[in-house]
Image (cartoon, rainbow, N blue to C red):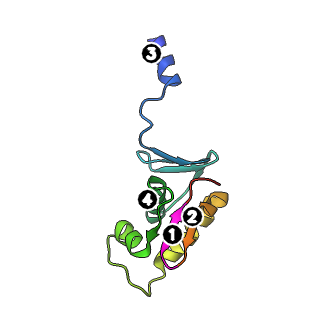
Amino acid sequence: SRVKAVLRRCHPADTGHVLSAGGLSMDLDCRTVTADGQRLQLTYKEFELLRLFLSHPGMAFTREQLFTQVWNMEYMDDSRTLDMHIRTLRQKLGAYGKLIETVRNVGYRMETGL
């Protein structure tokens, strides 16, 4: 029993449900996000945006794609909802907010390095 306990501590079970970029880590099972060990409080939509970015690093998403995948709705050109969610997500991520780049005339993408 002791040997099994030590082995469990040394080799965590399944890390396939954790996405990360540098010091930014997202546990999909627990729905938690940490930046340099500090837990962040994200809304449902902010969490889903970050999950999408972390699962496809470097990929540029159009506004339409983001709106469809996160809100499950058709994008409206005059809606600033997405921009405001990106803005607050960047603020909450602190230094890691710089990883979310605006791609002019396209949408947004998340780079892998800081």
Q: Secondary structure at mark 4?
A: helix
Would residue 100 be found to the left or right of residue 75 on screen? right
Residue at numbered disc 4: 52
Instruction: Classify the position of the C terminus by image quarter.
Output: bottom right
The residue shown at (54%, 77%) is 104
Residue sticking out furthest to the right? 95
Q: Amino acid at mark 2?
A: Ile
Residue at numbered disc 3: 4
Distance of label 1 from label 3 (alpha carbons): 45 Å
Q: Secondary structure at mark 2?
A: strand
Q: Earlier in the sequence, mark 4 or mark 2?
A: 4
Instruction: Classify the position of the N terminus by image quarter.
Output: top left
The residue shown at (56%, 58%) is 111
Q: Earlier in the sequence, mark 3 or mark 4?
A: 3
What secondary structure do most residues of the magenta stretch adopt?
Answer: strand
Contact (Cβ within 8 Å) of mark 2 with mark 1: yes
Distance of label 2 from label 1 (alpha carbons): 7 Å
